[in-house]
Image: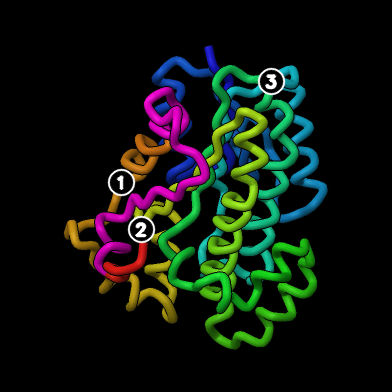
């Protein structure tokens, strides 16, 4: 029986992934700010450290899979919390649990990114260098200069930097025998989406956005893709970003891939 840790397990994609993995017979360790096997605030350094320590204790230092779903959308306040959870929280768990994954059976990690990660290229990402350098203060200063759209800058910028962080780790993780990939969902029916729809600044644009398939994704559909990437069917998939967006990326960037 594989042991798999899932952050953001309380709702949305994380909850759907946790349920699917349990249904398949895996032992799961859910991580969230409340109502989870392991409670931790990933927006804080001490919360990240406590999450890593708790996972290591619960799995006896050996982990077979890791799924990082915890994240905040552009309407979250303060905006600094978006980059704290989406980027620093995810990277801390990745790096803190890699050694445990190396001791696992056919280990793999999947990080939930977003189609927004490619809509703000690395070279144009105003917070990219600060995030990569681990400088939260500098990232917050850059967000302060973004005006009313600071939330979207924080969200898209953090997801772009997170995808880059995963790709930069691909060589080292591959040599260590641990597969590492990202999924990039489009619009998914989650509490994060509902918060965006209710926001006066972002709501109208979100409500008018339609994927080529003509509907929004269900969390279970993203969870199924995550399960695939964790399993033997994806044994040679490594360092990749898999779009699960109903065709949005192909429609918006048909010549870029």
Q: Sort mark 1 into few (<14), some (14-19) or many (20+) by Cα contacts within 10 Å.
A: some
The residue that disc 1 covers is: 218
In reply to whether residue 234 is colored magenta, the answer given is: yes
Q: Magenta residues, as a range?
A: 227-251
Q: How far apart are marks 3 and 2 (CA)?
A: 33 Å
The residue that disc 2 covers is: 186
> Is residue 20 something that shows in the picture?
yes
* Marker disc for residue 103: 3
Asked which secondary structure carries label 1, the reply is loop
- Position in image of residue 14 (x %, y %): 48, 41
In reply to whether residue 39 is colored magenta, the answer given is: no
Asked which secondary structure carries label 2, the reply is loop
- Position in image of residue 153 (x %, y %): 56, 75
Q: In which quarter of the image is residue 104?
A: top right
Which of the two discs, 2 and 1, labels the residue nearer the N terminus? 2
Instruction: Give the mark toward the camera: 3 or 2.
Output: 3
Asked which secondary structure carries label 3, the reply is loop
> Which residue is rendered at x = 45% and y = 58% of the image?
114
Which of the two discs, 3 and 1, labels the residue nearer the N terminus? 3
């Amino acid at each position: 029986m594989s042991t798999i840790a899932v952050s953001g397990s309380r709702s949305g994609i994380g909850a759907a992934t946790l349920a699917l993995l349990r249904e398949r017979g895996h032992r799961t360790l859910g991580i969230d700010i409340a109502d989870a096997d392991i409670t931790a605030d990933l927006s804080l350094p001490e919360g990240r450290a406590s999450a890593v320590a708790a996972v290591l204790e619960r799995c006896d230092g050996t982990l077979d899979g890791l799924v990082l779903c915890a994240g905040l959308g552009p309407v979250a306040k303060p905006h600094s919390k978006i980059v704290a959870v989406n980027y620093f929280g995810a990277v801390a768990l990745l790096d803190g649990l890699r050694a445990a994954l190396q001791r696992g059976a056919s280990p793999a990690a999947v990080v939930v990114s977003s189609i927004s990660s490619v809509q703000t290229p690395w070279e144009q990402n105003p917070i990219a260098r600060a995030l990569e350098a681990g400088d939260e203060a500098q990232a917050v200063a850059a967000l302060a200069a973004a005006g009313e759209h600071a939330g979207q800058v924080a969200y898209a910028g953090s997801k772009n930097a997170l995808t880059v962080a995963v790709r930069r780790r691909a060589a080292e993780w591959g040599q260590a025998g641990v597969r590492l990939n990202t999924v990039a969902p489009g619009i998914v029916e989650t509490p994060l989406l509902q918060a965006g729809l209710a926001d006066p600044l972002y709501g109208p644009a979100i409500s008018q956005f339609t994927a080529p398939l003509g509907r929004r994704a269900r969390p279970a559909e993203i969870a199924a893709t995550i399960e695939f990437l964790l399993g033997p069917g994806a044994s040679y998939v490594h360092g990749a970003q898999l779009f699960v967006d109903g065709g949005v990326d192909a429609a918006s960037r048909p010549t870029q891939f």
